Image (cartoon, grey):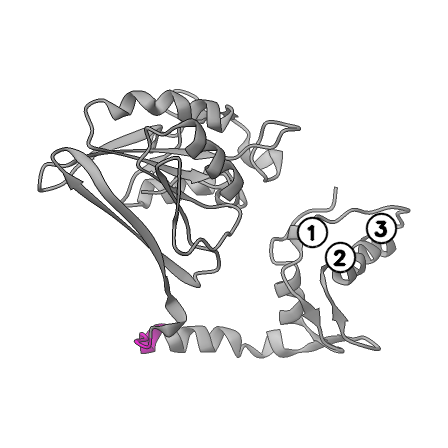
Amino acid sequence: LLTPGNHEFDIGLENLKRFAARARFPFISANIHAGAGSFPQLKPYVELKTQGGIRIAVFGVIQIEAGNGLPSTHPDKVKGLRFTEPLQKALEMKALRSGNHVLLGLTHLGFDQDQKLAEQMPELDAIIGGHSHTRVDPAEIINGVLVAQAGSDNRYLGRVELRVRNGSVVEKKGELIELKAQREEDPEVKAMIARFNQNPAFARVIAEAPFAIEGKDALGCLMTDAICHTHGLDVACQNQGGGRLGRLPEKITLKDIFTLDPFGNQVI
């Protein structure tokens, strides 16, 4: 299952729809509303049944910003979609409790919002969350609801275990598996990654600084100064999450720049 998060829209809605059409798993989100037939792969929830006869209901929700009611992506990327308040929509999923042994929330809200949802919706057995990149190990039990999140950047794999007896969840736990401890590698994939990282075009030095530039504030100022200088502006703004590098060395390569600013965001 996949519940779209804000970055699923970064390359545009049409690209996401093409990906969904090829995916071999359902897309779910209860608070994303598309026009009739415009996003047929997207459902508010799914109901599953194990070979042992356990019925599991799973719904999804995505965060929205208070100012514009949209996820944290460029408004042009979500044209044609409507978003409703996620916690309120999640509470409407209480009806799924009836007729199912397990009720799960697959969320892209952030850990603080997951905690609020658990407080408001004890009908849930577990919330598996994202967005805030929080490392929750072990998973927390809040108001009887297990709340899990596995950090970011593929560092950890989250494992959630629910024990069901006589139609009810009687035990629950969640933990993280540290992936860097795994030693088995696919040599073909490893070679492909090495070829990409050793691309001589990326290694080319394109600028030299008098000293290394470190930290989000300094690198953010560098980016806004560059925008002002290039476009003849008095003021420029750069969101803190837009810079994805912690340090620029004195000899700056093309790879450094693509790592610092990987999204191709336009200047408006």
- SS class, disc 3: helix
- SS class, disc 1: helix
What's the amino acid at mark 1?
A: Gln
Count of all numbered marks drawn on residues in the image: 3
Q: Position of residue 109 (x, y in %)?
A: 50, 38
Quarter holding residue 184: bottom left
Q: Residues within 10 Å of mark 2 (few under 14, many from 20)?
A: many
* Sooner in the amino-acid sequence: mark 1 or mark 3: 3
Q: Residue drawn at (27%, 24%), measured in percent from left and top?
A: 96
Q: Residue drawn at (76%, 78%), measured in percent from left and top?
A: 250
The answer to whether the residues at label 2 and label 1 have Cβ atoms under 8 Å apart is: yes
State how far apart marks 3 and 2 are (Cα): 17 Å
What's the amino acid at mark 2?
A: Gly
Q: Position of residue 25 (x, y in %)?
A: 28, 43
Q: Residues within 10 Å of mark 3 (few under 14, many from 20)?
A: few
Q: Residue drawn at (8%, 41%), measured in percent from left and top?
A: 52
Q: Position of residue 36 (x, y in %)?
A: 39, 20
Residue 151 disc label? none
In this rendering, the answer to whether 268 lies above or below 86 is below
Q: Position of residue 117 (x, y in %)?
A: 45, 32
Residue corresponding to mark 1: 240
Residue corresponding to mark 2: 220
Q: Is 12 or 65 nearer to us in this picture?
A: 65
Query: Which residues lie in the magenta part?
Result: 183-189
Residue corresponding to mark 3: 231
Quarter holding residue 162: top left
